[in-house]
Amino acid sequence: MARYRGSVCRQCRRENMKLFLKGDRCFSDKCSFDRRGFPPGEHGQKRVKQSDYGMQLREKQKVKRIYGVSEKQFRNTFKRADRQKGITGINLLTLLETRLDNTVFRLGFVNSRNQGRHFVRHNHFTVNGKKVNIPSYQVKKGDVIELCEKSRTIQAIIDSLDAIVRRGIPQWLEINKDSFKGEIKGFPGREDISLPIQEQLIVELYSK
């Protein structure tokens, strides 16, 4: 999969909002968006009037960057959402939220989705007792995600679990810090996605 290897802080500046791609650093004084809250590049501080298409494209790029998926993955996820019953935009966000890399982040095991993707790929988590190293794996209601025994002394994971109080856990998840287990209690509702996302603009973009 093609990966973006540049500065992730530039992505926040390009989308004109914090995407929280670097975990705890985004809450510190070192956050680049707080120091330079304008798009990168020579003409970043100029005001540009966006067309309807431009607004739709920026919304798609923003969500794609938040969840760290490629263009092909995002398009395929949208197609799945469109085939499901219900509202396509909410279906899309639900599919993205229930990716395994995002779920371990939301449970508090890691402090960013990128870190979650890294730890999943390196076999640090099991789902219902079986090792799963596919970040895009879709979790389901009743699934139990557990940190492997050998991984429970990793300082980055310990620090992230200690920060759960500040970050909070969404209602559709439950975490037991003592046993390093998380359970999927249901599916995320639209109210569980706190970032300002206008999913209808994405639906309009792909409906052209």
Image: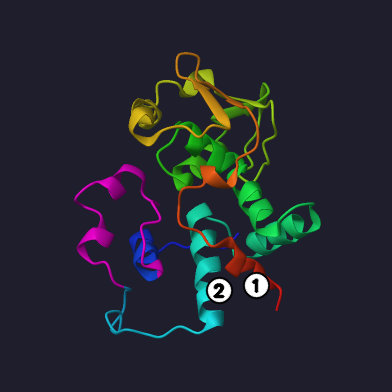
Reply above or below: 42 against 35.
below
> Residue 181 shows which numbered tag?
none
Quadrant (top left/top right/bottom left/bottom right) for the C terminus: bottom right
Q: Residue at x 31, y 42 (%)?
A: 24
Q: Which residue is mark 2?
A: 56
Q: Is residue 29 magenta?
A: yes
Q: In the drawing, does residue 155 fall left or right of residue 68? A: left
Reply above or below: 97 against 47.
above
Under circle 2, the secondary element is: helix
Q: Label 1 is placed on what type of residue?
A: Glu
Q: Residue at x 69, y 30 (%)?
A: 141
Q: In the drawing, does residue 160 fall left or right of residue 66? A: left
The quadrant holding residue 1 is bottom right
Q: Is residue 3 visible?
A: no
Q: CA distance from mark 1 to mark 2?
A: 7 Å
Q: Position of residue 135 (x, y in %)?
A: 60, 44
Within-10-Å neighbours for mark 1: few <14, some 14–19, many 20+: some
Q: In the drawing, does residue 153 fall left or right of residue 80? A: left
Under circle 1, the secondary element is: helix
Front-lying residue, 132 or 34 = 34
Residue range of the region highlighted in magenta in the rendering? 15-38
Q: Position of residue 164 (x, y in %)?
A: 38, 29
Q: Earlier in the sequence, mark 1 or mark 2?
A: 2
How many circles with numbers are drawn on the protein? 2
Q: Residue at x 36, y 45 (%)?
A: 23
Q: Label 2 is placed on what type of residue?
A: Gln
Q: Which residue is mark 1?
A: 204
Contact flag, marks 1 and 2 (Cβ < 8 Å): yes
Q: Residue at x 51, y 47 (%)?
A: 193
Within-10-Å neighbours for mark 2: few <14, some 14–19, many 20+: many
Q: Is residue 42 magenta?
A: no
